[in-house]
Amino acid sequence: MGREEFRVIGKKFSKVEALEKATGYLKYSGDFYFPNTLHAKILRSPYAHARIRNIDTRKAEKLQGVKAVISYKDIPKINAMHLFLILPSVQYFDSFLLAEKARHVGDRIAAVAATRPEIAEEALSLVQVDYEELPAVFDPIEAMKSSAPVIHDFAKRGEKKIEIRDNVVASLEIEVGDVEKGFRESELVVENEFRTSRPNNAPLERMVITCCPAPGGRLEVYAPAQSIHGLRMNIAYSLGLPPHKINVHRIYLGGAFGGHIHTGFIELICAFLALKIGQPVRAEKTREEMFLAYGRHPFVMKLRSGVKRDGTLMAQYVEMLDETGAYAFSGQSKLTLGAGFFMSMYRCPNMKCVGKTVYTNTPPLTAMRGAGNPQVHFAVESQMDIVAEKLGMDPIALRYKNHLREGDTFYGQGPDIVCKVATCGTEELLKRGAERIGWENRGKLRAGKPWLKRGFGMARGFHTSGAGSPEPSKFMMDYSGAIVKMNEDGTATLLTACVDVGGGNLSAHVAIVAETLGLTIEDVIISQGDTDSTLYDACTHASRSTYAGGLAVKAAAEKVKGVLLHWASNLLEAPPDILEIKDGRVYALENPSASIDIKDLVQTAQYRNWGTAVGEVSLRPTACPPHFTVCFAEVEVDTETGIVRVVRIISGADPGTAINMDNVKGQLVGGFHMGMGYALLEDTLIDRLSGRILNPNFSDYKTFTAVDMPVLDMVVVETFELTGPFGAKGVGEGATNPVAPAIANAIYNAIGVRFKELPITPEKVLKALKENQSSVRKF
Amino acid sequence: MKGFDYVSPSSVEEATALLSRNKGDARALAGGTDLLIGIMAGTISPKLLVSLKDIPELRRIEKKKGGIQIGATCTIFEIENSPLIKGKYDILSQACGLIGSFQIRCRATIGGNFCNASPAADTAAPLLALGARTVLQGPEKEREIEGKDFFVGPGQTVLKEDEIIKAIWFPEEERGKGVYVKLGRRKAMEISIVGVAVYAIFDTGKKIKDVKIGLSSVAPTPIRALRAESLLIGLKPDNKLIERAAEITSEASDPITDIRASKEYRKEMVKVLTRRALADVLLSGNP
Amino acid sequence: MSSYRATLDRIWNSEWGKTLKRKVTLIINSESIKLEVEPARSLLQVIREDLGLTGTKAGCERGDCGSCTVIMNGLPVNSCLVLAVEAEGSEILTIEGLSKYGELHPLQKEFVAQNAIQCGFCTPGMIMTAKALLDHNSRPSEEEVRRAIAGNFCRCTGYDKVVKSILAAVR
């Protein structure tokens, strides 16, 4: 079916839960209140690295209102599982519910459940801990030295114990072709080192987990999780329980950006306390605690690129250092993902990636929008501009020459997950972006005052749409399920485990069902569901939920369509293969007047005892088609204060079919906002002496406000991805990946200074300008 | 928050009596946007809060004794939009508009901004540049302290435990012009890295009759750049003079390095911003 | 006075059962409600926990994010930084009070229609701030809208559609 024939897909419609959100009706994790709930709080280590010589909880236990105080002694001696998404046999395990040794400032030493939060807080102050402070290390390069303190003596991968030497959790080496040969054949070789920062996901919702135990050991769980089945498995495994005892309820999240893919400690501790005490337990994170978990892995990347004089890429080699903090929640996945994305940036016959994931005594990091790709984009897209300049070539021309396109190999989630690119809107995006910004004016821009300098910069990029591949992955689960049924009034209900963290994927699923069954958006209802009632869905991550989740939803809806056509064929006395559904009716293709209203059809089926029209599907996608993006930026640098202002942005994407154009554009703007913050402002500051986070609040961890946003222009180029539901791919993470390098490239164009470290702060700009002694005009 | 008792008297006398009786254990509460954060963080631990919300005399902005008197519990939003302030004393209105957010401005008060005594207080530099005086009231007596002498150190003022600020007063000026420049990493919701306020009065011969330069965030308290001021007074302004005044102002500053900025950067920015503010006020046409 | 000091000390030593509660009357969404609250409880806590109005959100409890914004006596405030006792006799409007008998406020209609809502956590605060703005300034410029919502943190939308919705509601 051509896009122009769609009735619902691509048309303007409001998100299905928008009304509930606009009226304050919709409940997030913190809005569920149950009678007799206890409040849990966690005692956190003031030291970055310390042995616990002794811990005495007796005084705390005696405080009136305290129901339980637990420490390492009281928890199951099972390694905590954080990331059931990765196969357990290859997951990294390096922690318990409560720490036997403090490994970062804020590490969890004990936990309390009490009748009021204030009593729990007071109980924490009564827990006596005898710490033996140990030397700590906060820099990943320092951490790898043989003299560095040992953060983990060992860990496990699956069931196997692994030695951790030099604080290195994992190493990776992967090569395509022969880079040595590639560099020999290059006519220009460029090498630079790039460093990225430590932004926090900073979702606005402060997470709350409530666990309600039932007699017999069942537990009802309400918590923000990007995968309800993942959360169930993580709790079950970490507590040594069979999964069917845990029922996780699906709720809407107030943002996540990767922070709730893994299960942190607070969820496991809360579940343990609830089952131990036999009363509901609620654990709420303060905003400070929200800064103690989540964050994008800082990368140090030594990137060497070799090209021919005509710009053809011959070889790319990167040494990647991935810092994971005190615990490896993601194992080596950011490293693996980074390697795969690196190899997918451009067509290049010879590519090599060598990397390490390293522990430091800092709060553990997680996935954050892009998971390895923003870091890689910053390095590669900056380097491409450097190469272009040395070749005397236009930066856009260099991208045209080498960009990944139809037929090329793409690594969606590391080297293990591969597919061939089928749709690619990059060239159209580059063309339109250049037109819209007025790329021909580059180098000729004027600013209002003598001390202001303007410049243009661009970057291109992509991200995966899910983790599908022809062969099932050996390290990641990637299937989704859906159940669609017809209600007896001719509407449909959709039940999936797929979580909507704000991107509108559930609304996209509703549109898919509506389009398939000839219904309107209003006629498809979402049932919230839980792990008991829903089919397994891997996770809302890797920009997969519209694409991969949508495929399962479409397939389930197609099954229902089959039932409806079968029923209709009985009533219309025509074979099902000449029947079609559209606009609420089933009709015969050759004879449209032979038709029946869906409502009448379903009701008739019910009264004749034919049953419920239902379709259920569990499906693994066999491709991970990349969605492509571009960012064109105009910046203005105040050469006296070093402040960089982003004036104008063209943000473009190829998301395949845009099921809801507003939502696609919303992702572009939101992704841009995060990218601009990554480039210029956001960073978690850690004190180099104590390891304490210096800015665990929104005053000091700064994000850009509504007043700081530039003029935004969006370009959406719709390709038609045949492997996707109605041609759709993802868009959420691609939206952010090219932003930071585009801004860095624009700054270079404005003031001739190349920044290879994020964030690009005013002090760094001013210092570089003074060192260059250029572009500083006296008033 | 740790528990405390609360009382809301309806007169200044009652308020100061309560503060006096509970010396050391009581704090005055106005908007609460700084005080409550301090209590939640545990850095301030009062056992009694004396709310000033029901005392009408503290909430007026009026002409008085040849100047403008702003009651201590006037909110930043009220000051920003007051017909007595906006337009004529844009330097103050503008500074108020740069504080926090719409929500914060509707609760935060001028008295609170002064009592909290952050070196970065946005109302301080403009009011110092306007030559403001603080009116303090204790259980026994009232006293007036010049604005720049009110602040003693970061978070410290001359205010006694049983005193409140009653009002801030500054003299009316017909021919004055001023500007407040705030430097931050983003355009709103910022505690300034550097704040510079310049207020100048011209005589009929286009010479500078009087100029005051207020600085915030670059010393333990908000300060005046007295040497730079005296350099400018009586002269006709030009670029060279302004440049020199900016340099001297920078020399007068004594900033620290913190998570927002380094002291070297702040010192440099004092020069840049003072130069721009002086140029804006002194060179772009008289009022 | 010594017995009063003793009372203060008792409160201070957090004997929670004996904490002095204060009577307070709040007019919430046009309904007058009498409560007894501990002085240390914020308006936000009372609205969410005592009155069950969970549309107003707790994002930071420091006045940094605006997700707790309510309209108090016609002005937008961060309810996390207002003690419930300070709101004595005040008219408080929360997101739940904005639509009457199912009829949405124009701001709510525009937010929904323009798809300005992604995760939605900032939405109640955004709408309340926007309403307060429009009540004071019925024809704001885009710049004025952005300034008004500068204290409402949004991590999802980048503010673009939010601003457009507010401007659309003006018409």
Image (tube, helix red, strand yellow):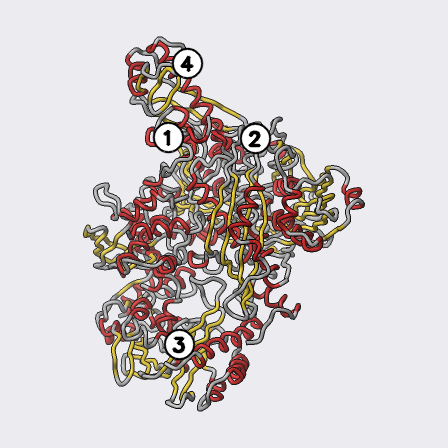
> Same chain for marks 4 and 1?
yes
Query: Marks 1 and 4: in contact by CB < 8 Å?
Result: no
Up/down of C2 relative to B246, above or below: above
Q: Rounded to the nearest whole Å, what is the CA distance between mark 3 and mark 1?
A: 58 Å
Q: Which residue does the numbered mark 1 point to in the structure image?
A: A527
- Residue at screen point 49% across, 87% down: B227
Q: Rounded to the nearest whole Å, what is the CA distance between mark 1 and mark 2?
A: 24 Å
Instruction: Answer with left or right where residue A680 lies relative to residue A125.
Output: right
Near-viewer residue (C2 or A376): A376
Point out which mark residue A477 bears: 2
Instruction: State whether residue C69 appears in this view.
Output: yes
Which quadrant of the figure has residue B211? Answer: bottom left
Amino acid found under the numbered disc labelled 1: Ser
Q: For the view shown, which residue lies furthest in the front direction?
A: A440
Which quadrant of the figure has residue A515? Answer: top left
Q: Nearer the viewer, mark 3 or mark 1?
A: 3
- Residue at screen point 35% across, 22% down: A486
Residue A748 position within the rendered picture, expressed as x and y whole percent measured from the top left:
61, 59
Point out which mark residue B126 bears: 3
> Label 3 lies in what chain?
B
